[in-house]
Amino acid sequence: MQVGPPLEKPAPVKQLKLPDPAISALTELETLLENSPRNATLLAAIHALVKRPRA
């Protein structure tokens, strides 16, 4: 059995805050994009960003 170096503690996760103009632009883009299977993943990602809690 080989013993490796001790495991390092992971760096703390830093939540970044989207500026209000970015939230507005994403919300507008979400309403303008066609609701199609090709856009489904993009719309889901935009929706998740817009609904994310603001710190």
Image: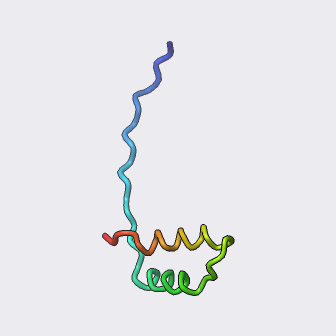
Residue drawn at point x = 46 percent, y = 81 percent: 22
Q: Residue furthest left?
A: 55
**Quadrant of residue 24 within the rendered picture:** bottom left
Residue drawn at point x = 34 percent, y = 72 percent: 54
In the displayed structure image, the side of residue 38 where residue 4 appears, left or right: left
Q: Position of residue 1 (x, y in %)?
A: 50, 12
Q: Position of residue 8 (x, y in %)?
A: 39, 36
| Vertical placement of residue 13 versus 41, above or below | above
- Could you tell me which quadrant the C terminus lies in? bottom left
Q: Position of residue 18 (x, y in %)?
A: 42, 75
Q: Residue furthest top?
A: 1
Front position in the image: 42 or 5: 42
Q: Residue furthest front?
A: 36
Q: Position of residue 39 (x, y in %)?
A: 64, 73
**Quadrant of residue 40 within the rendered picture:** bottom right
Residue drawn at point x = 37 percent, y = 40 percent: 9
In the displayed structure image, the side of residue 28 where residue 17 appears, left or right: left
| Vertical placement of residue 16 versus 19, above or below | above
Number of marks drawn: 0
Residue drawn at point x = 38 percent, y = 71 percent: 17
Front position in the image: 34 or 19: 34
In the displayed structure image, the side of residue 9 where residue 27 appears, left or right: right
